[in-house]
Image (tube, rainbow, N blue to C red):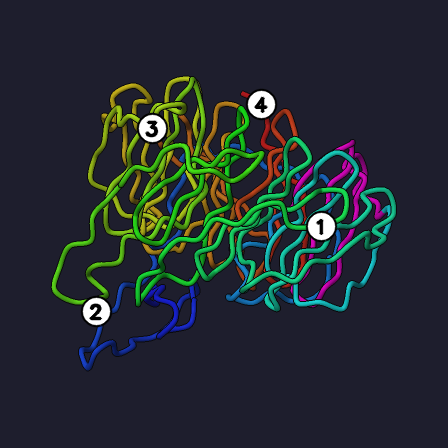
Amino acid sequence: MVKARFGLIIALSIGLAGCNALGGRRQTVDLPAPLPEIAEAQSVRWLWDVDVGGKSGERFPYLAPSTGDGRIYAASADGRVIAVDPGKGEQVWRVKTKTRIAAGPTWVADTLLVGTLDGEVLALAAGDGEVRWRRQMSSEVLAAPRADQGVVVVRTLDGRVTGLNLEDGSTRWVYESTVPALTLRGTGAPLLENGFAMVGLDNGKVIALRLTDGRLVWEETVALPTGRSEVERLVDIDGDPALLAGGLFVTTFQGKIAGFDLRSGRRVWEREASSYQSLAASREEIYEVDDQSRVSALDLQSGDRLWNQDALRYRVLTAPVIVGGHVVVADAEGYVFWLDRETGRVVAEERVDRKGISAMPLVTGGNTVVVQGRSGRLAALSIARE
């Protein structure tokens, strides 16, 4: 079954496990769906793979590769960071930071940013991996730091959002929010756009902060807690918001998915949903993976459901990404799946890492996607063009 993803009381786990008890009640076993049968499957080509090192296990779904300045960057849970030439998969440099990296890396200008389980943010030179500065935060950093206009925005597990100076890591501002007694163990990364930092909170709210000074510009509730127990009242926003066409799109666990006007925070539409993953958005659709690993396409303007694919149910899928005419997800058994964007039909699959994949795939251009497995394997794959 998919083990309950409740934090503070229950450690984060998005792997497959046996039955577990919560509050004295035995939970229903939900076995992952078998691999789908694909008629006339499209071929998948391996471009390269490299070992990042440091098995991430189930506790680190936030270690996702990033790209910038013609390179791909990846980090491991035991503190290694590498730079890879995307052409041949050749390692450019590798460093050991001697930290427990939990989030990142994020590339901005000539800097890489990572967050750690010990509550630190590290800034490394993208050219050679040298540590430029490190800053102790108030709590664990499980979401990748983001930066724009010289400000690094960091979301910590205790509900704080902090703005740091990109040059030296000094604090510029701090915004504090109240964290519910029980939350999912995880946080979504801030979204920076047009001088604002948009952040989803554990209480089901989304806020916009002014990037220069952290002042609250607007705040909206995506979903209100309902139910009698603390578990039933979980409405965390753990996925990264999606931005397109002046709209901000956010989804909560056991709540709703909603679209907001970026500047005013005015709600444009909403619908019932439950997800702890990030959203993917195109010019016309939004793609969502819910908490049962069903993949859906929604109309960007109205929120109406266009299609729903449940052939991968309970396979513990990653957040989706858009790769050409396909939506790509990976799962806890290490498979990568390509779905047709128009119909949701699974058209290709490839196993990359037997230890599983937790992090959202990285799109590097064209039909190429880079995935990072829990064993430390980093692989670039490409699907044949139709």
Measured in 3D between alpha carbons, the distance from the residue under mark 1 to the one under mark 4, in whole angstroms, is 44 Å
Identify the residue at horizontal 76%, vertical 42% (top origin).
167
Q: Quadrant of residue 69?
A: top right
Instruction: Name which residue type carries label 2.
Output: Thr
Where is residue 79 shown, x and y percent of the image? 72, 64
On the image, numbered disc 3 is attached to which residue?
265
Mark 4 is surrounded, within 10 Å at the Cα level, by few (under 14), some (14 to 19) or many (20 or more) other residues, namely few
Q: Where 23 sits versus 300, above or below?
A: below
Magenta-highlighted residues: 65-91
Measured in 3D between alpha carbons, the distance from the residue under mark 3 to the one under mark 4, in whole angstroms, is 40 Å
Secondary structure under tag 1 reads loop
Mark 2 is surrounded, within 10 Å at the Cα level, by few (under 14), some (14 to 19) or many (20 or more) other residues, namely few
Where is residue 277 shown, x and y percent of the image? 41, 47
Foreground mark, 2 or 3? 3
Where is residue 353 shown, x and y percent of the image? 59, 57
On the image, numbered disc 2 is attached to which residue?
28
Is 268 one of the magenta-colored residues? no
**Viewer-side residue, 331 vs 287:** 287
Q: Upstream in the sequence, badge 3 or badge 1?
A: 1
Is 355 left, or right, of 295 in this rendering? right
Secondary structure under tag 3 reads loop
Instruction: Name which residue type carries label 3.
Output: Gly
- The label number, if any, that marks residue 385 in the structure image: 4
The reply to whether the C-beta atoms of the residues labelled 1 and 2 are less than 8 Å apart is: no
Is 301 left, or right, of 23 in this rendering? right
- The label number, if any, that marks residue 33 in the structure image: none
Measured in 3D between alpha carbons, the distance from the residue under mark 2 to the one under mark 3, in whole angstroms, is 39 Å
Q: Upstream in the sequence, badge 3 or badge 4?
A: 3
The reply to whether the C-beta atoms of the residues labelled 1 and 4 are less than 8 Å apart is: no
